[in-house]
Amino acid sequence: MHDRLANLLGATALNVADLVAEAHRKAADLGDSASAALLTVDEFPGLAVTTLGRYIGLSQPAAARMVDGLVQRGLVERRAGTGRAVAVHLTAEGEREAARILESRKGVLQPIVASLDPSERVALEALLEKVLHAVYDRTERAGRVPDDALGDLLCRLCDRAACLREGAACPVTQAGSLAATGGGGHG
């Protein structure tokens, strides 16, 4: 019944993701996980390696190897954290890389959004919020990621500040709140 719509959504999502990933690689010469790590540490400085891994969907050993690579490139540094934990912080070069990643993302997405007229943009924003609620409810990663990190995982390559401008609420955070209170089930 909705085969064409689902197909259009799938093609759009896949190709937009490919364009954004290509832009990230060109901007920072990093893979998706490393780009996500930089953006996450930029937003949440001092995360432990294990927590960072949860936020971007990597196991602790994979996260440690990725952080090793980022340290070697001079993008992050390890510092003493709470207890035995090691905190990850961006270096000045890491901050510049994170900014380049967000700019490259915006460079891909802004022209796509600009192809819509203002009323279409308002409608699409509302629809995408609803779709993100449904994605949150249906993600298979939910069983592998603690509830408090699922929203961060889904938003791992987002410009979080853009979502919160002008008093807006993050739709993924809203979906998490609804799921926690039993009000999920969108879509």
Image: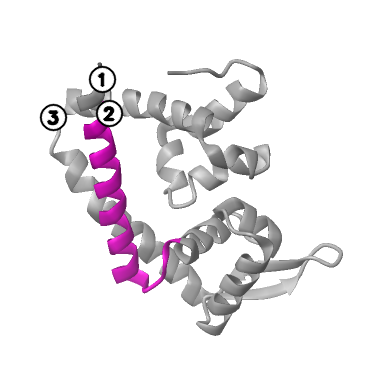
Q: Is residue 22 magenta?
A: yes
Dot 1 and dot 2 residues touching (CB under 8 Å): yes
Residue annotated with mark 2? 6
Q: Residue at x 64, y 17 (%)?
A: 182
Observer-nearest residue: 33 or 79?
Answer: 33
Question: Please, what secondary structure does the residue beneath circle 3 have?
Answer: loop
Q: Position of residue 125 (x, y in %)?
A: 31, 28
Is mark 3 in CB contact (under 8 Å) with mark 2? no
What sort of colour scheme is used for the picture? one colour
Dominant SS type (magenta): helix
Give how far across and how far down residue 118 sits, in percent.
Answer: 17, 28
Q: Which residues are magenta?
A: 6-32
Q: Quadrant of the C terminus?
A: top left
Q: State which tag comes first along the sequence, 3 or 2.
A: 2
Dot 2: what SS?
Answer: helix
Badge 1 element: loop
